[in-house]
Image (spheres, grey):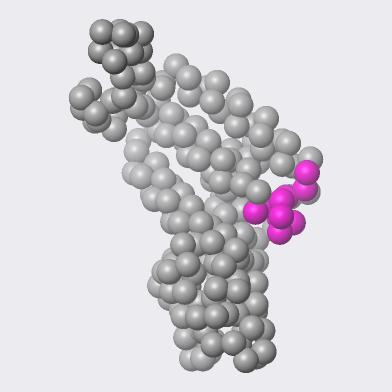
Amino acid sequence: MQLVSKALFAEYMAAQKRNKVFKGLGLEHMNKPCPVIPSQLTSTTLRCSQFQMDALCLRERDLLNRFVADVLKCKAKGENTEQAFNTCYELAKDLGRAFSEQAIFQKFVEAESTLPAGSLKNVLGTLRSLYASICIEDVSFLRYGYLSVDNGANVRREITKLCNELRPHALALISSFGIPDAFLSPIAFNWIDTNSWSLV
């Protein structure tokens, strides 16, 4: 994750040095106004792909700004760049994770947009909402103040609802990955027979 953060730092500094807009590494959202998370999150809001994208972009944008500011403070105190990155390791880890989750979410949205309306698109939309909600439930959203405690509880409740909605589709979703039966762990088959004394 630190390598991701270093690449983002380099891109940020290059854009600032050239006094140009961000291009590349998925940072184009930094050129737009900063998104705002509503003060009260409803189920409809939490399932909205635009809200989900805004929340993930807000976290990435803020963490990148914090990371750059902290690294520059460390360098101003006389630390070299590597020492500064190591000093800011927690922010680097959070930023790398935020970048990765936002990139994966973007691929989810792109895949969903190519599907015609129907049950497959609905299931993929529910799966996208579950992924985004799990990302938004991450402690960094509370730690850095993007979510209130009440909204964090709303996100957790929504995750439970989404899991219940996906339960009937779970086997089909797992099968869609195409994992051969030989690679599935024994617990997916007959756990008792696999762990019987004759085999131990």
Viewer-side residue, 37 vs 76:
76
Q: Is residue 21 visible?
A: no
Residue 132 vs 33, above or below: the answer is above
Residue at the spot 33% in from the left edge and 13% down from the top edge: 195
**Exactly how many numbered labels are in the figure?**
0
Q: Nearer the viewer, residue 33 or 137?
A: 137
- Determine the residue positioned at 48% across, 91% down: 18
Q: Is 142 in the magenta? A: yes
Q: Position of residue 98 (x, y in %)?
A: 53, 57
Q: x, y (%) of residue 27?
A: 48, 69
In the depicted view, which residue is nearer to us: 95 or 24?
Answer: 95
- Determine whether, in the image, residue 149 is placed left or right of residue 5: right
Residue at 60% from the left image edge and 63% from the top image edge: 90
| Picture layout, residue 46 above or below residue 23 | above
Q: Quadrant of the C terminus?
A: top left
Which image quadrant for residue 121? Answer: top left
Please provide the residue range marked out in magenta.
Answer: 140-149
Residue 23 can be seen, yes or no: yes
Image coordinates for residue 82, horizontal then vertical, percent: 50, 81
